[in-house]
Amino acid sequence: MNDLDLERPKILVVDDHPSSRMTAVALLTIEGYDVIEAESGASALAKLHAAAPDLILLDVMMPGMDGYEVCRRLKEDEQTRLTPVVFITALDDRRSRLQGIEAGGDDFLTKPFDQLELSARVKSLVRQKRLNEDLDHAEKVLFSIARTVESRDPNTGDHCERLVLQGRAFAEYLGLTRSQIRDLMWGGYLHDIGKVGIPDAVLLKKGRLTVEEFSIMKQHVLIGEKICQPLRTMRGVLPIIRHHHERWDGSGYPDGLKGDDIPFLAQVFQVLDIYDALTSERPYKRAFSSEEALRKIVEETKRGWRNPELIEAFCGFTQAIEMQATNEPIWFEKYIKLENHS
Ligand code: SIN
Ligand code: FE
């Protein structure tokens, strides 16, 4: 048995009525749990990070912040979203159950508590949570494989780290959703994870790849997709991994997708990937200025390789960032307009 198994699960009981709280605390203590208490939604949220409970028993009707709101907030928080929430509701109240499900609740218990029911629910949810934590560990393993791949590839340096930061900034500029932003950031770390399966002779080769070597290199998008496929939480990242080398006119790989058949996040990611490669130093090239890089991307867009609308947005984004940095209006207005060419 490892240390984790020996740790007693910790339950946070949130209820504004001291008497209900006491009943729950007594029952759970008998079952061998560590129990902490909060008398309001606000105090529960305040305690959450430090206490890191394995499960929360949450009263619905409380003055101030109600249980639904507490649940919504903790499910939005990266650190606490895996913590199961059991709502305490009145018997047979269908409406509040529906609201509880909408708020992200995991289960329900009715007052007065039935000891057997309480014990069974809590036990199974705590077990499920620990399983989910292992899944998160599996994610961590993937991220560390990706880091290892990056350190093996002499071309990249801090490429991934920069992609993640730029990815968030550009995604916010485009007004993408929270989950799209997360997928894009994860894509920053994971897009080239498949290079783990590319032999050194190809990955580390200085100078141009032969046609045959390039066809091996291309495999990295398929290998990467295969590595990440088993994890449900990777679903939104898979299109980025598979399709980050497609081109707008269908001349890319692996599927030769055209135009908006290319998943949007893969299009967005690709612009960031290319811009960062252009503006960084590589063994075979110096770092281009952002003006030179954009000029090249615009050229490639005119050649048909990129989505003109997206590239225009990217130019606007880069301009906004440069203006923040220099406080000066910018040079590239003169050529970012693509309408005449596309
Ligand atoms: C890469 O994924 O950065 C290299 C493969 C390619 O240039 O297509
Ligand atoms: Fe790649």
Image (cartoon, helix red, strand yellow):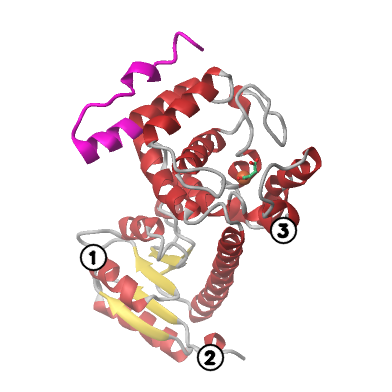
Q: Label 2, on which residue?
A: 6
Q: Which of 194 and 330 is in front in this view?
A: 330
Q: Quadrant of the N terminus?
A: bottom right
Choose between 317 and 290: the one closer to the eye: 290
In the depicted structure, whether residue 178 falls above or below residue 311: below
Foreground of the two, 299 or 79: 299
Q: Residue extending furthest top?
A: 340
Q: Does the magenta stretch include residue 275?
A: no
**Quarter containing ligand 2?**
top right
- Give the extent of the magenta segment: 318-342
Residue 295 placement: quadrant: top left
Q: Mark 1 points at which residue?
A: 42
Q: Which residue is at a point 55% across and 50% down the rendered structure image?
A: 283
Q: Distance between the residues labelled 3 and 1?
A: 55 Å
Q: Which of marks 1 and 2 is in front?
A: 2
- Residue at label 3? 200
How many residues crowd mark 3 within 10 Å: few (<14), some (14–19), many (20+)? few
How many discs appear? 3
- Residue drawn at x 51%, y 39% is 269
Relative to 9, is 256 on the left or the right? right
Tag 2, which secondary structure?
helix
| Amino acid on which the number 2 mark rests in the picture | Leu
| Above or below 100: residue 84 | below
Q: Which comes sooner in the sequence, label 3 or label 1?
A: 1
Residue at horizontal 45%, vertical 91%? 30
Question: How far across and down, in percent of the image, does residue 122 sit?
Answer: 50, 75
Does the closest atom of ligand 2 sit within 8 Å of the Cβ of label 1? no
Neighbours of disc 1 within 10 Å: few (<14), some (14-19), many (20+): some
